[in-house]
Image (cartoon, grey):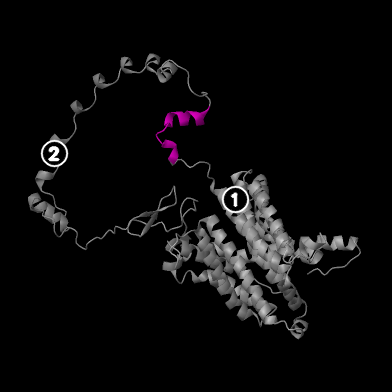
Amino acid sequence: MKLLRTFPGNRIIWHAVIVGIAWLLLLLLNNNIDPLYSSYLALIAMYATAMFGMTILVGLSGQVSLGNGALMAVGGYVFALTSMNWQTVPFFGWQWNAVWSMVFAGLGGVLVGGIIGGLAARLKGPYLAGLTLGIAVGVPAITNRFPELLGGENGLMLTVPYPAGGYAATTDVTGEVVVDEISGEPTDTSTEVVVEEDQYAELDLSEFGDAATDFVEGEEVLPEEDLLTEEDLLTEEDLLTEEDLLTEEDLLTEEDLLTEEDLTGGGELPLDSGSETDLAESVAGDSGLLDSIDSGFILERWQASMAIAVACVVAFAALNLVRGRQGRVWKAVRDDPIAAAVVGISPSGSKVSAFVVSSLFASLAGAVFAQILSFVGPGAFSLGLSLSLLVGIVLGGRSSLLGAIIGAFILVWLPEFVDGVAGERGWPEQITNNAPNLLYGLLVVAVVLAAPGGITGTIRSWVDKSRGRSRSTLS
C-alpha cells in the first residue's frame, strides 16, 4: 500500500478509477430510467461540465465571471458551423463527425478564453465583473451582425445526431447536402436547379392560338369558344342512382373472412398469438422489412450518454488540475498575489490560465447543449444562462467539484419543482416563469449570509469542527 501511494502518477490512476466508476454507474442509471429523466440527466451533465470551469475560475482563481454563458455560445456556434459545413476533416480527409466538432469547439473556447483572460488579467472586483458582463451581453448579439453565417435571431437548426451518420446541413434542392432523416447520412444532391429569367422564351405556342400568347404576355383574355356553356354542366342523369349503390348482397359476411386454417394451411401457428414481435418477424420473414426499422434507439438516452461522457472527461481533467501543482498556484494567487509573485508565480499568467481552462470547459458544455437542443441561437445563450451558472456554483460550493455537480442538479430540479407546484395551485403563467429566478436570488442571499462556502463548504466546515480543526470557507 505504501508503494502504491508513492508510485509516480498514482493520483492520476486514482482519479481515473473514480471517474470511470462514476461513468459506468451513470450509464447504468441512464439505461434504466424513463427517457424524460434521461433528458434531465443530460442537462445536469451539461451544467456540471460548464461549472467545473466556474469552480476553477471563481473558486480557485478568485475571479468573478458573469460571462461563461457567452463562452458556451462560442462552443455551440463553432460546433454548429463545423458540423453543418465540413464533411471531411481538414488535412486528413476523414469523415466528419461530432467528435471533431467537439474538438474544434474546445479550440475556439481556448482562443477566446486567452483573449478575454489577457484583458482581465489587470482587472479585479467590479471592473472584472463589468468586463465579463459586457461579454455575456455582446457575444450573443454578434449573431445579429452576421445573419447569413450565424442565423441571426432565428439561429441555426442542427441535424438530429443519429449514431449511424455524420453531421451535415439540411438544405433544399438548391443546396449542396441533404441528410436522410432516418439514418442521418448525407445524400448526393449535386444536381443544381437553374431557372432562366424567361423560361417560356423558347416555347412554341403557335398551335394554341392567340389566347395562349396573350396569357404568357400577361393578358389573361380567353376566347368565347373556351368559356363554359350550359351543355358542359352536370345534369341529374350524370349523378348516381339507386341501382349504382351497394346492396346487402355485396357486403362482406363472416364467411368471407380468413380463418386461422386459411393462414396456416390447417397447421398450427409457429408463434404465440399474443406476441406482436414474433408476429412481425413471421410476416416479414426473409423479406428484410424489419431492417429499415430502428431497433431501440432513444434520442434522449443517447444525448444523456454523450453529455455524461463529456462531463466525465472534463471532471477527470479538472480533478488533476485542482489537486495538482496548477491548483496550488491558483490558490496561492487567490489568497495573496504579492506573496505568490515573491516566490516566482506570475499572477497575471495564473489568471489567464484559469480563464483559458474555464473557457475550454464552457465551450465543450456549449457544444453539448447544441446537441441536446439541436439548435443554436442567441436566446439559448442569454445573460440568464451566465447568471444561472454563477448562482449554481455559489449554491453548491465555489471551490468544490462536487459542489458544481450539486449546483447543476439544483439548476435543473428547481424549475421543474416550481412548475409542479404552479400546476397544482393554478398559478398564472407569468408567475410560474419568473418564480425560479426569484428563488435563485433568495437562495443566493441565504447562502451568502448563512453559509458562505455553499452546501459543500458548509458540510466540510461541520466535519472539521467535529474533528477539532478549522478550515477557510474558500479552501
Quadrant of the rendered image containing residue 468? bottom right
Reading the image, the residue beneath label 1 is 39
Task: Return the residue at label 2.
Answer: 229
Which secondary structure class fits the magenta region best? Answer: helix
The kind of secondary structure element at disc 1 is: helix
**Residue 71 shown in magenta:** no
Task: Tell me residue 306's x, y (percent).
Answer: 58, 54
Q: CA distance from mark 1 to mark 2?
A: 65 Å
Residue 372, percent across and down?
A: 55, 55
Label placed on residue 343 = none
Look at label 1 and name its amino acid. Answer: Ser
Residue 114 visible in the shown view: yes
Residue 265 appears left or right of 136: left
Residue displayed at 64% across by 79% down: 120
Q: Mark 2 belongs to which amino acid?
A: Thr
The residue stretch that appears in magenta: 275-291
> Residue at the location (44% across, 39% down)?
291
Q: Is residue 206 left or right of residue 400?
A: left
Split into 4 quadrants, where in the image is the N terminus? Answer: bottom right
Q: Quadrant of the C terminus?
A: bottom right
Residue at far bottom of view: 342
* Residue 142 vertical placement versus 408 (above, below): below
* Image coords of residue 456 (percent x, y): 78, 61
